[in-house]
């Protein structure tokens, strides 16, 4: 969808909210439209109203958490993921995003504990291993970072972000050839699109994908 589509969607949902303000759906969908227009404050406000009307929708907590992450309010995002996980504990993205928030808050031990739980639940998910490597880098433990990064690349050798981390570590050790090879693989494997919506770059040493499942507004009545 394009900018004009989201602007038009907001106008549509304004009418829906005016007619039936007690329904949570128009508030939620308007929040989605505002998010896609980078109005994270407005999107958060609408998501909050939607949750006031129906506090049992895990996707809305996810959406509000992403809005809060975009505003660097990681404690508030963690609170939202606590609720999302309580409602849907099988969604690994919620656990992963909560670990990211812990890392960005410099609560590295809490992030590691979160990631240990993720690895135990989803042993073949390479993203969790690479994020553990990144947290270890923040903790200046390059030995453990290398170990977990190796595990990540064994599970998914096509992860361009993991190769970026490998290049970063090699550069820090002045291993120029290794860094060049890793960076070449990083550029080769990274795609200009993802199969899911995301909130963009990671605030750490490499790109982060924060999964955000949004409804397709074009499919709405």
Image: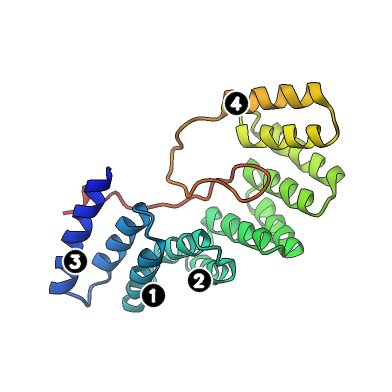
Q: Callout 2: helix, strand or loop? A: helix
Instruction: Name the image quarter holding residue 168.
Output: top right
User: Quick check: 34 left or right of 99?
Assistant: left
Q: What percent of the width, then of the height, locates residue 32?
A: 33, 58
Residue, disc 1 = 55
Cα separation, mark 4 vs mark 3, equals: 43 Å
Q: What percent of the width, then of the height, locates residue 113?
A: 73, 61
Residue 83 has which mark?
A: 2
Identify the residue at image location x=32%, y=52%: 215
Q: Looking at the image, is mark 1 or mark 2 earlier in the sequence?
A: 1
Identify the residue at image location x=62%, y=36%: 161
Q: Looking at the image, is mark 4 or mark 2 earlier in the sequence?
A: 2
Q: Looking at the image, is mark 4 or mark 1 earlier in the sequence?
A: 1
Q: How is the image coloured?
A: rainbow
Q: Looking at the image, is mark 1 or mark 3 earlier in the sequence?
A: 3
Residue 187 has which mark?
A: 4
Q: What percent of the width, then of the height, locates residue 146?
A: 81, 39
Cα separation, mark 4 vs mark 1, equals: 42 Å
């Amino acid at each position: 969808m394009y900018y004009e589509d989201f602007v038009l969607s907001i106008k549509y949902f304004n009418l829906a909210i005016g007619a039936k303000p007690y329904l949570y759906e128009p508030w939620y969908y308007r929040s989605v439209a505002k998010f896609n227009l980078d109005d994270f404050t407005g999107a958060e406000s609408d998501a909050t109203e939607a949750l006031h009307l129906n506090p049992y929708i895990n996707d809305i907590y996810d959406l509000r958490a992403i809005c809060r992450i975009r505003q660097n309010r990681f404690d508030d995002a963690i609170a939202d993921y606590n609720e999302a996980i309580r409602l849907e504990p099988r969604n690994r993205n919620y656990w992963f995003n909560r670990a990211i928030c812990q890392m960005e808050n410099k609560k590295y031990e809490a992030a590691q504990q979160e990631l240990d739980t993720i690895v135990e639940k989803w042993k073949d998910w390479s993203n969790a291993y690479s994020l553990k490597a990144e947290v270890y880098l923040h903790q200046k433990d390059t030995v453990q970072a290398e170990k977990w990064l190796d595990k990540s690349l064994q599970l998914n050798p096509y992860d361009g972000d993991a190769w970026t981390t490998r290049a970063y570590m090699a550069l820090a050790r002045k291993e120029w050839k290794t860094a060049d090879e890793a960076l070449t693989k990083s550029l080769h494997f990274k795609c200009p699109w993802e199969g899911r919506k995301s909130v963009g770059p990671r605030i750490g040493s490499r790109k982060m994908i924060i999964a955000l499942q949004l409804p397709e507004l074009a499919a709405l009545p």
